[in-house]
Amino acid sequence: LARLLIDTNAAEQTDKPVKLLETVDGPDAEKDADTHEKAAYLLGATLFKKGDWVKAEYRLARALQFYPNGAESAKSRFWQGRCYWFQAAARATKIKELGLKQQELTTQVAQRGGTPNEAETSRRKQLDEQVAQEEAGYREALVRARTPFQEVEDRLLKKKSAEPLNPDEPKLLRLTSFPPPERSLNPGDYVAF
C-alpha cells in the first residue's frame, strides 16, 4: 500500500505511507529481512521526496547501516548526500536573510547619524552570532555531503571496471562526481541546490 501511495505521488500529500513504512521498522524487523530492507530504503526515499531532509538523512543512514550493499544502497547514499546538500541550501538562504537584516540595521544606524544605541549594538551582535552559526552549519553540511557522494562514486567506478553498470547507474555516477569538484573549486560561491 505504501508503494502504491508513493507511486501515485500521494506521499507528498499525506504521512500515511511514512507511517505504514515505519511499522515495518519495529522489533520484529529481522523476521522478514527482505521486507525490512525494502521498507527501510523506501522510507528514506519517501522522506527525501517529501523534502524532509533531516528525517530522510536519518532513515537513509539507518537503512544503509542494516543493508550497506543492498539493491538500493547506491541511490540511498546519493540521496543521503543530497539531503546534506539541501540542508546546506536551507542554511545559505538563512544566511542571506540574516545578511539583509544586518544591512537594514546598518542603514537605520546611518540614517540616525552613524552611532548605534545599546539595543542596536545588541541586535547587531545577535545577528553576527546567528550568521556565524549558520555559516558553520552550512560548511558542515557540505563536508558531510562529500562522504556519501564519494562512496557512490568509488563503488560505481569499481563496479564499472568489473561489469557493465545498470541502466540508471551512469547518471548516478555523473551526479555524484560533480558536487565535490564544484564545491572545492568555488568554496566561497558554492550554493547548494
Image: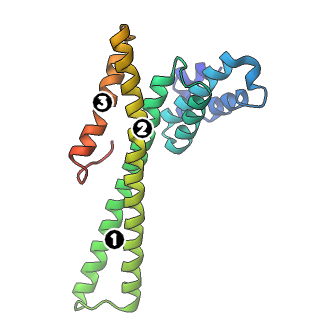
For the residue pair 127 and 36, the one nearer the viewer reads as: 36
> x%, y% of residue 84?
43, 43
- For label 2, the residue is 147
Labels 2 and 1: the sequence-earlier one = 1
The quarter of the picture where the C terminus appears is: top left
Q: Earlier in the sequence, mark 2 or mark 3?
A: 2
How are the colours assigned in the image? rainbow
| Residue 102 position in % (x across, y down) | 31, 73
Identity of the residue drawn at 52% across and 29% down: 45
Q: Residue at x 21, y 44 (%)?
A: 185
Q: Nearer the viewer, mark 2 or mark 1?
A: 2
Residue at mark 3? 177
| In the image: residue 42, left or right of residue 173 | right
The residues bearing labels 1 and 3 have C-alpha atoms spaced at a distance of 36 Å
**SS of the residue under disc 3:** helix
Question: Label 3 crowding class (10 Å Cα cut-off): few <14, some 14-19, many 20+?
Answer: some
Q: Quadrant of the N terminus?
A: top right
Q: Residue at x 38, y 46 (%)?
A: 143
The answer to which image quadrant residue 113 occupies is bottom left
Relative height, residue 5 to residue 166 (above, below): below
Q: Tag 2, which secondary structure?
A: helix
Q: Position of residue 171 (x, y in %)?
A: 32, 20
Mark sitting on residue 101: 1
Q: Nearer the viewer, residue 32 or 115?
A: 32
The image shows a total of numbered marks equal to: 3
Question: Mark 3 or mark 1, which is nearer the start of the sequence?
Answer: 1
Q: Helix, strand, or loop for circle 1?
A: helix
